[in-house]
Amino acid sequence: MISFENWKQGFLVTVAGQRLLWHSAKRPAVFVHRAGEMRSAWRSAGTCLPTMASGRSALFRFSSGLVMREELRDLRSGASLVDYSHDYHTAIFSLYFSSLDKEIDSVRLRFHDMPKAHWNGFGPREQHLARGTIALPLGARSAGFAMDGRFILCSSSGERKLRFGEAEMRFDLDLPAEVHFGYARTPAEACRLWRYSFGSLDFSFENPDELHRGVHSGTSQTLIAAAARAHSVVIPQEAAGLLGSLSFSGAGPEDYQQLNIAVAQAVREGSIWKYANLMLCQPDIALPAQFRREIGNAFISLGDILPARLKNRYAKIRAGLEKYWEFCRMRWTEDGIPALLHPSLLYPQDVALESRDDLLMAGADMVFAPNLKEKGELASLVLPEGEWVHFWTSRIYPSGRVTVHAPAGAPALFYRAGSEYSWLFDSVRQVASRL
């Protein structure tokens, strides 16, 4: 699973058959920065030899004073936490960095990556695909998930900058710092691994006011609050991309709830119905409490009151789907699969889905396109593999691109044919058609 090899006064680390970190005096992959110097003044961490090594850990001291500890946790032995009856390939490789020299304040790491690897997430961003340089919000816990079943989590006392290139990753981290690589077979299994290793163990709020006080057991601060300080206000037309990005970031319910509040506050009157449609399709746990039933009322303060008939329709549909929303919440809590997610998390092999930032899934059985950027009442989307039932007409569609009518109160919403909740979806459709 993991091997450490001495290499010309340096080392070569291979994890899960992948050459991950290769450092030597002539070919450095670990660099340090000293306080007071230009930010671009990176120098090699120097030569090193392991001072302690075993099958699962090693400690390295570099000639510069940098200290690196490596640790492997093979979680297949943790049957008390996770059911590994399916022989999941589950392990976490961790690197911990500190320095014996107080002048060294940052470390730069160059990791080898798999060719054509596709990373996603790292907080709420317009696009979920990770390209180029990403500066992570200070203090907020944000992960990235790859289509091959890996995840990355970086922790630092300060600045964190990640750069993704072709078969290479570069991380700049203020010391002390940690880097964790999770290994699973699929993104869905990686979510489960993340959930039991780093995620919050409690997705409930005893007091709804906790949402507004910024309390979340899984993060030191929410991704949304941190991102708001680093970027401009939320652009509502990007809401689907932002929500999809969160699903690849190890985010908790509060992050989704705060993002939905930020989106609603930025909506202009003329397009309020489209954002009401977006809220209609989200599981309860992803929405702030005031949106969960009376969605129309949540937009009153924005200066546009939706028609009473439409507000009643929203409320009846959401109330009718309560059993499914509860299923979504339980799966998030037990398996780590977000209640609101980007389809690629469940369909990593579908290349038609991976770059789309206008699609979302509510649990595993509902897919929808919010139609936030397009004009008019038509919505175009790409359905994942299998057969899907149009929520409003009961017409069955195969996978691939479809275009449907999506007026106020009837967004482009589909449910999986053969879902155990098909009876519920159809009964709600029949009620909605009479409203």
Image (cartoon, grey):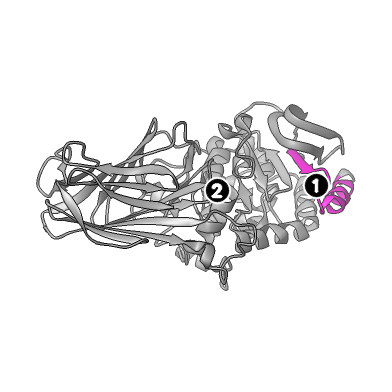
- Image: magenta residue range: 412-432
Residue at 63% x, 35% y: name it. Answer: 271
Between residue 365 and residue 348, name the one nearer to us.
348
Instruction: Give the residue pinned by disc 1.
Output: 309
Q: Of marks 1 and 2, which one's residue comes earlier in the chain?
A: 2
Image side of residue 326 versus residue 285, left or right? right
**Does any portion of residue 254 appear in the rendered image?**
no
> Gap between marks 1 and 2, in whole Å?
33 Å
Question: Which residue type carries mark 2?
Answer: Ser
Question: Which residue type carries mark 1?
Answer: Arg
Between residue 180 and residue 376, name the one nearer to us.
180
Whole-percent x and y of residue 146? 50, 42
Residue at 21% x, 36% y: name it. Answer: 27
Whole-percent x and y of residue 388? 79, 38
Q: In the rendered structure, does residue 253 fall within the stretch colored magenta? A: no
What secondary structure is found at the residue carrying circle 1? Answer: helix
Residue at 53% x, 51% y: name it. Answer: 184
- The quadrant holding residue 383 is top right
- The quadrant holding residue 233 is top left
Label ID, residue 247: 2
Check the image and report above or below for 53 versus 223. below
Image side of residue 238 versus residue 277, left or right? left
